[in-house]
């Protein structure tokens, strides 16, 4: 059974990566992959109740991410239809390609530590469409570097990446500990590929006209922008206070913005009011990307349920032996397989009694699982979101970005281990 499901996963994964030559949308392949994996598990498993139980355990995790994504995309679309992003883009005047790349990369890096890498990727993709409206090839390069920036920025913050959050909630790392230990390695992980890409970039973009004609007034643009960004920043605060899943905080933000837009446009004609409504924003959301997420998460969840991921982790433990190398390889593996079940498997393999709070194992795992996903476009939530929004092809990313991302990943890992050794930690 396990072999059959793994084979289905490999074929489904190939269909996703070969989306362009096959001319079949990756969402189709992902949905079929997810459903077929669980169908095989149900038909070939010995205990249907166990299959049902495992699926019911997985569903909240999947729904949490899908609803979170739906809420984040809705907020971003609301900001966009109110022309709120022009408040930021009008302030970024750089036309030199290198300067602009450096600026937006650092913006994404710090933004993702406060929001999270998925939301940051969605926000930055919208900004890039305003900053680089015409040159698609350059925009794809910028968007790909944003994936690296968002993942690197999320790794050093307890609320920036879902895996770092898992380790934080699971009492493996402390908030201040992870910030102190991973900030510099994460920054190096970003700067190495950014500086590498800057070497290949020349020239300038056409000077963008600063947008001066708007359909919305200044008050509306500023209000919706700050309300939207504020709603996104409030999500981790909401979660900390209430201990409810993040999508509840995200939907709270959607609800507040929905109310604000209803009040803001209540005296306008019906057609004008509809253009700025949340219902209109929802119609613009890329639902195919959300369905793609469902398929991928369901398939990976099935691999976790049948024990394939734990078997892989145990195999690594028995054959490699060295923990640093194992965690480093798990980071690379997270570019192929979702990092959430991988980190969950590692947390099951090694206990808090063996490796207490802020042990090197957990800190290095947070770095590797958080940044390793940048090696492939479908290796992280940020990458998948950017792939859906900009229609980046798997092989284009592999050819243009993967090597730079890998060099940055290795540089950050060496930096972490070097700092750890220099500081003479004993845990």
Image: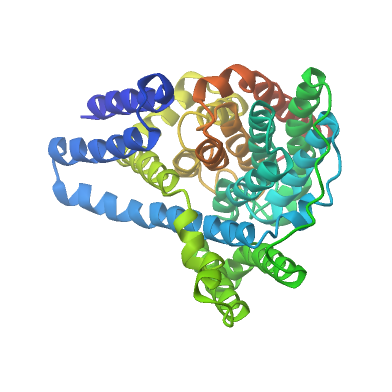
Q: How is the image coloured?
A: rainbow
Q: Position of residue 213 (x, y in %)?
A: 76, 58
Is 418 positioned to the left or the right of 113 in the image? right
* Numbered-mark total: 0
Query: Along the horizontal axis of the image, is 14 left or right of 225?
Result: left
Quarter of the rendering occupied by the N terminus: top left
Q: Quadrant of residue 26?
A: top left
Q: Is residue 423 or residue 227 the one in the foreground?
A: 227
Q: Quadrant of the C terminus?
A: top right
In the rendered view, tell whether residue 154 sits above or below residue 21. below
The picture places residue 401, in percent across and down from the top left corner, at: 64, 23
> Is residue 90 visible in the rendered structure shown here?
yes
Residue at 14% in and 47% down: 48
Write the residue at 43% across / 53% down.
66
Q: Is residue 118 depicted above or below 70 in this figure?
A: above
- Pinpoint residue 82: horizontal percent, then vertical percent: 64, 63
Asked if residue 416 shows in the view, the reply is no
Residue 419 location, quadrant: top right
Relative to residue 249, is residue 297 drawn left or right?
left
Front residue of 62/210: it is: 210
Residue 146 image point, x, y percent? 67, 37
């Amino acid at each position: 059974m396990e072999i059959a499901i793994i084979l289905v996963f490999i074929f489904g994964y190939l269909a996703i990566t070969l989306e362009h030559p096959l001319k079949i949308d990756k969402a189709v392949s992902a949905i079929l992959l997810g459903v077929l994996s669980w169908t095989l598990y149900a038909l070939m498993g010995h205990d249907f109740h166990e299959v049902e139980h495992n699926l019911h355990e997985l569903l909240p995790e999947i729904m949490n991410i899908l609803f979170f994504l739906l809420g984040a995309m809705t907020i971003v679309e609301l900001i966009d239809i109110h022309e709120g992003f022009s408040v930021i883009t009008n302030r970024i005047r750089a036309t030199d390609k290198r300067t602009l790349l450096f600026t937006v990369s650092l913006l994404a890096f710090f933004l993702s530590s406060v929001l999270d890498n998925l939301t940051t990727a969605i926000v930055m993709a919208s900004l890039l469409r305003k900053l680089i409206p015409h040159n698609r090839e350059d925009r794809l390069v910028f968007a790909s570097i944003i994936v690296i920036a968002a993942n690197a920025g999320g790794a050093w913050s307890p609320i920036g990446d879902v895996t770092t959050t898992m380790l934080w909630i699971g009492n493996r790392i402390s908030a201040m500990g992870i910030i102190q230990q991973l900030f510099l390695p994460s920054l190096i992980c970003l700067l190495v590929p950014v500086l590498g890409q800057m070497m290949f970039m020349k020239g300038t973009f056409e000077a963008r006209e600063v947008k001066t004609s708007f359909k919305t007034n200044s008050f509306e643009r500023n209000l919706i922008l700050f309300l939207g960004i504020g709603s996104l920043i409030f999500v981790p605060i909401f979660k900390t206070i209430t201990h409810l899943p993040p999508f509840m905080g995200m939907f709270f933000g959607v609800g507040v913005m929905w109310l604000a837009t209803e009040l803001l446009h209540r005296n306008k004609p019906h057609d004008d009011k509809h253009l700025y409504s949340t219902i209109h924003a929802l119609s613009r959301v890329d639902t195919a990307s959300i369905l793609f997420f469902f398929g991928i998460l369901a398939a990976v969840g099935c691999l976790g349920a049948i024990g394939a991921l734990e078997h892989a982790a145990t195999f690594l433990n028995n054959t490699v032996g060295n923990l640093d190398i194992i965690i480093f390889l798990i980071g690379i593996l997270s570019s192929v397989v979702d990092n959430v079940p991988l980190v969950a498997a590692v947390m099951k393999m090694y206990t808090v009694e063996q490796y207490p709070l802020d042990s090197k194992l957990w800190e290095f795992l947070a770095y590797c699982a958080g940044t390793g996903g940048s090696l492939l476009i479908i290796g992280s939530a940020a990458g998948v979101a950017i792939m859906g929004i900009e229609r980046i092809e798997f092989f284009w990313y592999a050819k243009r970005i993967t090597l730079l991302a890998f060099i940055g990943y290795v540089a950050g890992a060496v930096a972490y281990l070097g700092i750890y050794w220099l500081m003479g930690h004993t845990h």
